Image: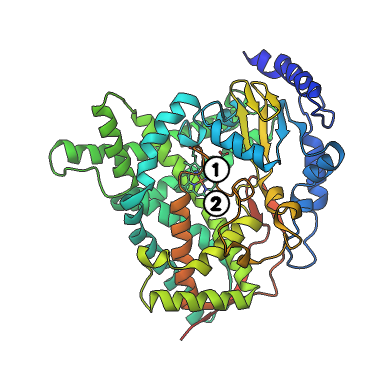
Amino acid sequence: DGISCYFLNPRRIKKIMERQGVRGPKPRPLKGNILDMASLVSQTTSQDMKSINHDIVGRLLPHYVAWSKEYGKRFIFWNGVEPRMCLTETELIKDFLSKNSTTSGRSWQQQQGSKHFIGRGLLMANGKDWYHQRHIVAPTFMGDKLKSYAGYMVECTGEVLQSLQNAVESGQTEFEIGEYMTKLTADIISRTEFNTHYDKGKQIFHLLTVLQHLCAQATRKLYLPGSRFFPSKYNREIKSMKMEVERLLMEIIQSRKDCVEIGRSTSYGNDLLGMLLDEMQKKRESGFSLNLQLIMDECKTFFFAGHETTALLLTWAVMLLASNISWQEKVRTEVKQVCNGETPSVDHLSKLSLLNMVINETLRLYPPATVLPRMALEDIKLGDLHIPKGLSIWIPVLAIHHSKELWGEDANEFNPERFASKSFTSGRFIPFAAGPRNCVGQAFAIMEAKIILAMLLSRFSFVISENYRHAPVTVLTIKPKFGVQVCLKPLN
Ligand code: HEM
């Protein structure tokens, strides 16, 4: 299986795609085009940008720019031994994402690389497993359940704003807002997942962050990712840390189960974990079983998938509002009118349409997930194309969001007004992907972003600091290389 995965299949895939007119840069043995990509990116990102502008595709995806110039809208390249076909035609993207939620999914490489920290939770599952898990998880992010998390968000935001206020009162004026947002979204997901076991949750997630870096470091040492090949020094540390994380998670889950079993309580709790256990119980009654390992993997997955992405959305939104004062004031006025001095409630949120436009425009210019890779798990028909099993479809979200062809001449400008009418066709705005396998936490993330920004705007006014260096970089997500420094002024 390993051999065919690495050597035979790719050659066949290359031939099949060449016959359909899809070509691309010549791959090197094992490394594919990874070195070309790395050297291009290291050139384009070696310096800060000259001004705060959003023309960042050439900087962050220089290989995409070069290859699409040379080979057209569809081209094939090699991420190591994994062949990827770039897909930019919006009709095909829509078609692909709406129809192939079980016939495409995570590659073997992706699953191996994340096995030790998020395991086989929803994000990494494929096919039937994915389908069952999605039906258990999705209800915990919808309707009244979703609304019930708003209180946790308001509480955590209040605490962080208070700490900013205290710092301002003791004389600090400049803040790196990214740090605060990262801490805040981590607090919120810990609180939402584990309400009464909140502190233990924070401890778990701290360990998980360390574990994530260890796994990334271990993979970077090799062109063939996968735990089996990790150097043993990493392997031991990774394994013991994983065990510690799971021991702590099991303690929480067990204590919830005990409470129900001895009859002290009828539900597993009013948090995400409780809802997940309730859903699992319902499914069990209809004959389906979900094991505890999977529950732990889902808990880890929500943290991993939901906290950094949301923190980045917020950090870029603050950067954009701090350098576009007229929009900052417009949104603040809206928040004042709608919330009338109260802390934002779920009912307020749907009325904050300017804020919603700013959030969308932020997600368009700085989509936290810059690319979407999905591997064909079966042969797939896509428009005029035949996609063979084993080929990954690679959707360059960032490039699509900045395309002048799709968005007009001002594609690289911050102009939330473009979201005033809802007529943006799907396929060109895909920060959360689309179709049945889109982001399950999308509504959660938007609710969280609105609450945090509304509360921040009502408490402080802010401008971008002279010390801010505009230097977006991508790893998997788009980050400000040196953070986002803003000067805060309390409002009355
Ligand atoms: C601004 C914030 C967020 C962004 C931009 C974002 C983006 C995305 C994207 C693009 C995907 C699809 C990935 C792919 O198929 O390759 C995804 C999937 C997912 N996201 Fe999010 N996400 C955000 C917040 C969250 C939050 C808050 C949670 C949970 C608390 C979450 C949980 C998930 C999960 C579990 C999946 C996998 C869904 C599946 O495969 O069925 N995300 N997200």
Q: Position of residue 410 (x, y in %)?
A: 74, 63
Mark 2 to mark 1: distance in Å? 17 Å
- Closer-to-camera residue (412/247): 412
Between 228 and 94, which is closer to the camera in this rendering? 94
Estimate how packed mark 2 is, as few (under 14), some (14 to 19) or many (20 or more) residues with alpha carbons within 10 Å. Answer: many
The tag on residue 330 is none
Q: Quadrant of residue 379?
A: top right
What residue do we see at 44% from left, 71% from top?
455
Residue 74 placed where, x, y %? 76, 35
N-term mark: 2 or 1: 2
The residue to which callout 2 is attached is: 309
From the viewer's perspective, is residue 243 above or below residue 410? above
Evaluate if marks 2 and 1 touch, with contact meaning CB atoms under 8 Å apart: no
Asked if disc 2 is less than 8 Å from ligand 1, the answer is: yes
Quadrant of the rendered structure where residue 484 is? bottom right
Secondary structure of the residue carrying numbered label 1:
loop
Q: Label 1 belongs to which residue? A: 434
Residue at the limit of the structure toward the right, as seen here = 70
Percent coordinates x, y for residue 417 in the rendering: 61, 67
Q: Amino acid at mark 2?
A: Thr
Q: Quadrant of residue 451?
A: bottom left
* 366 versus 160 height, above or below: above
- Determine if residue 136 is in view: yes
Up/down of 92 relative to 366, above or below? above
Q: Give the amino acid type for the residue marked by disc 1 in the picture.
A: Ala
In this rendering, which labeled residue sits more in front, label 2 or label 1?
1
